[in-house]
Image: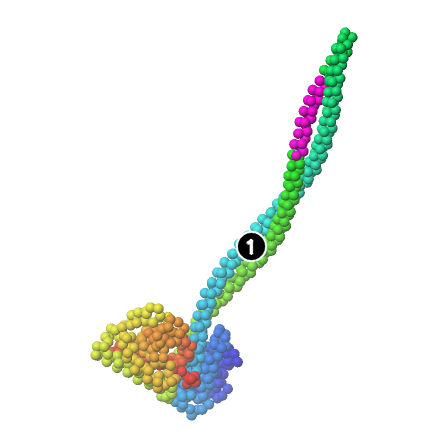
Amino acid sequence: MAASSIPVSRAANPAAARPRSRPRLGEVGLAVAATGAALLALLGGRALGELAAAGVAAGAVGLGALAAAPRRDPSCSAQTLAGRLSPNVDQVMIGAAETSYFVAGVARQIERDGAELDTLRDRADELAATTATVATGADEAARLAAEVSRAGTASRDEINRSRQAISDAQHEGAEVTVAMAALADRTHAVHAIIRTIETLASQTNLLALNASIEAALAGRHGVGFAVVASEIRGLAQATRAATVEIAARLREIKDGVTSATSSIEGLTQQVAAASTGAAHVGELLGEIATAAERSGERSRGLAEAADALARGTHDVSSAIRELRASGERTERELPRARDSATRVCELGEALQDQVAEQHIGGRHAEIRAEAERAAVAVVALFEGALARGALTLDALFDRRHVPIPRTAPTKYHTQFDDFTDQALPAIQEPILARDPAIAYAIVTDDHGYVPTHNDRFNAAPTGDPAVDLARSRGKRIFDDRTGRRCGQNQRPYLLQTYQRDTGEVMHDLSVPIVVAGRHWGGFRIGYRSAGREG
């Protein structure tokens, strides 16, 4: 059954269906205690879950049942009732202690989780900002890639046009080369004609010379023929000079054609190479444009993914903030549950005081007697040391707890702890030897400082906080609620139930220590409940 569904009214007042009788001693207080404990169970069931409230609920039901016991048995005496009540009150106190410890643990965990959530939230915010920056950068990269793709395409088109122009130039160069070759061929033909003319001119010149000779031999009759021969010879010489001039010009033309042909051929080769290079550049530009287009697509995809991630991260950050706010609300509510558990525990202590007044004996009475004997022995030890000068009053009441370096949890020195290390074990250790159910028997000053712990908890520090927490507990200040009350209590005794920082749930009974008329602290005995021994 869930803790929140415990029938409180019947547990607190089981006599509602029976004839009413006059309550005996303590019945009203028991009913009130049962009601308070059951209400705590309900509160714990709502706020902390069934497991945390189970112990308190069980104690509440048992307490309510005992509240009704006198009505069922009118002959039941107060002492008998107290004897029946004592173990159930123990269970109430244990349940309240467990609940209080659980609530404190939840508070610590919420605080730790809160710090981690704050860190996680900050990182989520940073991730969101970074992702938004990535998305913006990816958008810009996609835009630049699109521009590169467009520029590459345009450059490729321009290269293609240039290739066409180069190809046209190649064709024209080839045509010019052909024309130049034809011109060279014609020049060769003209040279042949000129050589023929030169030959004819030479022969004509020779004939004219012969004619002149014959005319001279003919005398007066060959004068006219000599004149003709002279003219023919002059014409032959002029023709020869002209052919020489023409041949020189043709040689110049031939040389020019040859040079032009070589230049055109070289240019054609360069144009061909440029065409090949332009084709390669065009291919590269095409690849660049294609790669830029793919890069743009991927950048757009990255931008979309980054944008989605940024939105998701913002959602996570918002969820973390809501979770943190919920944790803070729970943290604000936890003190109410802790205070309720504390009040129930205090009510249990008060009930145990009433039970003790009936002188029923039992476990708590045995421990109280043990603590009182130990306190008397400690007072005698301190006052004896003062009397013989082994201690001064100022040293004994020194409250300047000086931290011991490199200890965790922190340990402290005082002006009296060297003395207690030597003297107190003789009083403390026999108590543990006599009763295995006793976990510790120690002296504490009024600040919760334990100068000398029991041997089993007085190991040298190892430097490991987890180990030292359990095994090296001497010279520590226990300033939790239980520890403070033990040292400050001045009533004849104080019975508390709590969960230690090492996890055990136990009773703590302390009696005051008064030295030279001044309250010094108390003697604490921690022991397990009768139902939880072993």
Magenta region, residue range: 237-262
Where's residue 52, x and y in %?
47, 76
Q: Is residue 238 magenta?
A: yes
Is 429 or 216 nearer to us in this picture? 216
Report helix, strand or loop for mark 1. Answer: helix
Return the x and y of residue 442 as percentages of the image width and height: 33, 79
Q: Which residue is mark 1?
A: 135
Quadrant in the picture for residue 499 = bottom left
Apparent side of residue 449 relative to residue 342 in the rendered image (left or right): left
Answer with left or right where residue 53 lies relative to residue 282. left
Image quadrant where residue 362 sits: bottom left
Extreme residue toward the front, this view: 217
Q: In x, y percent, where is residue 418?
A: 28, 75
Image mark count: 1
Seen from this angle, which residue lies furthest bottom?
75
Q: Is residue 203 left or right of residue 104?
A: right
Pick the front one: 429 or 486: 429
Tell me the residue at 64%/41% (across/down). Answer: 273
Q: Magenta segment: does it hold 100?
A: no
Q: Seen from this angle, which residue lies furthest top?
A: 220
Q: Quadrant of the C terminus?
A: bottom left
State the image coordinates of residue 322 (x, y, percent, origin top left).
51, 64
Q: Determine the main secondary structure of the stretch shown in magenta.
A: helix
Q: Residue at x 49, y 88 (%)?
A: 18
User: Vertically, is 178 above or below 318?
Assistant: above
Residue at the image position 36 percent from the left and 86 percent from the top: 435
Above-or-below relation of 47 to 144: below
Residue at the image point whose x is 56% and y is 50% from the top: 140
**Residue 7 in view of the camera:** yes
Vertical placement of residue 54 versus 221, above or below: below
The outermost residue toward the left is: 388
